[in-house]
Image (spheres, coloured by chain):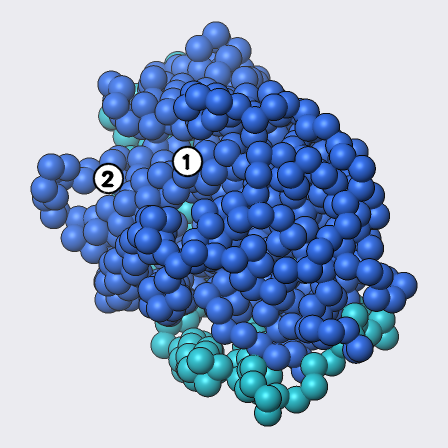
Amino acid sequence: MATHDFAAQDSHAHAAPEGFIRKWVFSLDHKVIGLQYYFLALCAVFVGMFLSLLMRIHLIWPTATLPLLGDIKPETYLTLVTMHGTIMVFFVLTTAPQGGFGNYFLPIQIGAPDMAFPVLNMLSFWTTFLGFIVMIAAFFVAGGAPLHGWTGYAPLSAIQSAGPGEGLGADLWIISIAIFCIGALMGALNFITTTLDMRAKGMTMMRMPLTVWAWFVTAILGLLAFGVLLSAGILLLMDRNMGTSFFVPLTTINGQLTGHKGGSPLLWQHLFWFFGHPEVYIAILPAMGMCSQLLSVFSRKPIFGYKAMVYAILAIGFLGFMVWGHHMFMSGMSPYTAFAFSIMTMGIGVPSAIKTFNWLGTLLRGRIRFTSPMLFAIGFVSLFVTGGISGPFLAQPVLDIQLHDTYFVPAHFHLIMGVASIFGIFAATYYWFPKMFGRMMSESLARWHFWFSFIGTYAIFMPMHYLGMAGMPRRYSQMTEVNYLHDLIPLQKFITYAAFITIAGQLIFLVNLFWSMFKGKKASDNPWEATTLEWITATPPPHDNFGGKTPVVRNGPYEYNVPGAPRDYVMQTDPEVEPSH
Amino acid sequence: MGLILLVVIWLITLISTYFFIAKTWWLPAGASAAAAGIDHHFTTTYILMGIVFVAAQISLGALVWIYRDRGSSSGKVDYSHGNTRLEIVWTLLTTVLFVGLNLASSSIWASERFRAAEANSVRVEVTGMQFAWYFRYPGPDGKFAATNPELEDASAGGEAALGLDTKDPASKDDVVTGTMVVPVNREIEVILRAHDVIHSFFIPSMRFKQDAVPGLAIHMHFTAIQTGDYEILCAELCGLGHYKMHGMLKVVSQDEYDKWLAAREAEKQ
C-alpha cells in the first residue's frame, strides 16, 4: 500500500455512534444507510421475482392450483403484473443503485466524511422503508392489491368499482408511491448537495469517477421527476376518495354513473410519464456509471472518452425530460406532438450510442481481467446494446402502431432498464463487496451466477420480441380467447422454463452473498488494484471514511498503464502524472 | 474465459438474428392500404438495426477475447484517453441514422393521422366498455343519434348498452352490432369512444391501433383491401376481463355490405 497525502484534519459531522440502535438501525452513517437500502432492495427483488414466476406459471398453466396459494384468477394475474412492476421499478431499480451504492460510495469517492445531511439521509431511508411496508400491505387488505398496472392509468386506477383490488389496495398502492417519492426527494437533495459541496481538495468535477457523475445526474432527475409523481398521486387519491375529477371524465361502470365529470385521463398519462421516462434513466444511469468504471479498471486502461461520457450522461439527463410523449403515441394525444416526441426520442439514442462506442473503445487494446464484476459489466454492455436496438422501433410512431402494448415493449424495457440495470447492481456488488464487508466473494460461484443470468436473460426476453411482432398483447392473463395467440403458446412455454432456470441461478448469488460475508477470503484494502478514493482507505472504511483526514486528489479517476509509472495503476491521490486529459 | 464469452455472445447473436431473418414469428399478414408502407418501413428498420446489433455484439465478443490478459505475452496496453475525432464521427453517424429513419417514416404517419377521413368514407362508431366492443352505424340518414349515459343498460347489450336515446329521431335507423362489418376498398372512418376506462382498439392485420378514451371521440381511418375475418383485440389494460375483450372484423364486398346493413335495418323496424 502506497502512502497517501491527506489535507489537514477535518472534523467529522458526527461522532461514531455506540449502541446497536444508533449504529445499525437509526444510523446517520451513509455507509450503514447504503447497506440498509441495499438489503431493502434485496428483499424487494426476491418478492418481485417471485411474483413474476407466478405470472409465468399462470400464463402457461392457467388452471394450475399452487400449494398454499391456490388458484390464480385472471384478476390475480393482473395484480401480479402490477405489483411486480411497481416493486421492481421503485424498490429495486431506484433503490439499490442510487440509495444503496450511491449512498455508500458517493461520499467516499469524492473524499467526503459523510453525506451533507446525515439526518435527512436517515429519514430518506426510513421513509422508503415505510413505503415498502405500505406497498406490501396492499396484498393483505380486503380486495387485495390493485390490478391497474404499474402505470396506474386513470380511470381504471381512479374508480373504486372499476375492478377487484381497486378499493383499499389501490389507495395503499398510491400512498406507498407517494411516501417513496418523499424519500426519493430527500435523497436527491442530499446527493446533489454532497456532490457540489463536499468534494475533497483537488477533486474537480472533471476528476470525478463516472459513477459519481451518474449518481449526481440521477439525483437531479429524481428531484425534478418525483415531485411531479407525488403531486399526481395526491390528485389521484383525491379523485378516488374526495369526489374530485382531475383524471376522470363522465364515465359509467357497468352502466352505472360514477359521479365524475370533466377530468382528463390523458392528464394522468402526461404527469405519470413526465416522471416515468426520466425514471428509466434513474434506473439505468447508475448502472452505466458503474460499468464504465469497471470496464476501465479491468481492462487496465483509461476509460475511452471520459469527457464524451460525461457529456453523454448530461445529454441523457437533459433529453430524458423531453421524450415522455413516446409512451402515448396511441393515447389520443395530438399526432403532431407524436412527431416531435419521436424526433427527441431518436435523439436520445445518440448519447446512448456514444456510450456504447466508448465502452468498446475502452476494451480495445486493453488487458482484460475476467473477474466476476467484469463479467457482469461485459454482460451489461451486451444487454444494453440488445435492449437499445429495439428502442428505435418503438420510438417511431408508425411502427409503434403495431408494437405498442405488445410483448415487444416488455422485451425492450426489461433488457435495457430492467436486467441491464440489475447487471450493473450485480457487477457493483461483486466489485464493492470486499470494501463493504472486508471479505471477497467466491469467484467460482459468481461465474456460475453470471452464466445462468446472462444466457437466461436472453432466453427469457429475446423471444418476447417475436411474441410482440406476432401481435401478443401485454397483460393478457390467458391466450385462449384470441385465435392467433394459440400458435404462440409454445414460445410462452419456453420463456417460462427459461425463467425457472434463471431464477434458480439467482439462488447461487444469495448463497454467495451470505456465505462470503462470514466465510469469504479476507480482502486487502485494494484487491482490484483500482485508483479511486474508496481503495485508499481501510477495508471496511472507518466511521468517517478516511480516519479523520481528507484526501488530496491529484489525478483523474482512470489512470491505468500510465507510461513510466512504477505499476499499472496510479491512485487519484498519487503525485500528478500529467495534466489531466 | 475470453473465448467462452466470445462463443456465447456470438451464439446468442446468431440464434436471435436467425429467427428474425427466418421470420419464424412475424407480423400477421397485412390487409389494409397502410400495411405495405408500414411493413416496408419495418423491414428497413430491421435491416439497419440488425446490422448495428450484429456488429456491436460481434465486436464485443471479439474484443474481450483478443484483448484478454495473457500475462507476459499480452500486448502493450494503449494509454489513451480517447479520440475526439472518432467521438464526432460516431455521434454524427448515429444522429444521421436515427433521425433519418424517423424522417423516412414521417410521411406514413402523416397520411395515417394528420388528415381527416375522406368525405365519402363509411362511418362506424366503436365503443369500448368492460369487456366488449360495440359498433354503431348511422343508417341512411347519416346521423348518429344522441346517447345518454343515464339510459345505459350494460347487461342488455346492443343499443341499450350504448344508452341510445330513442327519443332522438336520428336513432330510428342507427344500427348497433357486436361484429364490425365493413366493405372492402372503402375508407372506414372509425369514431372511437369508451364508457368506463381506457381501452385500445387493435386490429393487427389492419396495422391499426388507437386507444379509446372516456370523454373523447377520436376520429381515425383505415381502408381494408382484402375480404376476410380479422380479429379485434383490446390492447390497453382495462380490468380483469382484458384478455377476453375480443371482437371480429368482417371485411366483405360492397354488395354484401349493403345487403347486410339493409337486413340489420329491416330487423330493427
Q: Please name the residue that numbered disc 1 is placed on.
A: A40
Q: Quadrant of residue A222?
A: top right
Q: Residue at x 71, y 48 (%)?
A: A213
For residue A487, side relative to residue A462 (left or right): left
Q: Nearer the viewer, residue A204 or A518?
A: A518
Identify whether A436 is placed above or below B38.
Answer: above
Q: Report the chain holding disc 2.
A: A
Location of the N terminus of chain A by quadrant is: bottom right
What is the CA distance from the residue labelled 2 to the residue labelled 1? 30 Å
For chain A, give the colour: blue
Image spot of residue A227 (x, y percent) = 64, 26
Q: Nearer the viewer, residue B232 or B78?
A: B78
Image spot of residue A104 (x, y percent) = 57, 41
| Tally of numbered discs | 2
For residue A120, side relative to residue A374 (left or right): right
Identify whether A344 is placed above or below A371.
Answer: above
Q: How many residues crowd mark 2 within 10 Å: few (<14), some (14–19), many (20+)?
A: many
Q: Amino acid at mark 1?
A: Leu
Q: Nearer the viewer, residue B69 or A496?
A: B69
Q: Please name the residue that numbered disc 2 is placed on.
A: A74
Q: Which chain is cyan?
A: B
Q: Which structural element holds mark 2? A: helix
Q: Report the chain holding disc 1.
A: A
Residue that lies at the very extreme toward the top in this rendered image = A242
Q: Residue at x 21, y 48 (%)?
A: A58
Label number found at residue A75: none
Q: Nearer the viewer, residue A237 or A211?
A: A211
Q: Residue at x 28, y 45 (%)?
A: A50
Q: Earlier in the sequence, mark 2 or mark 1?
A: 1
Q: Is residue A94 visible?
A: no
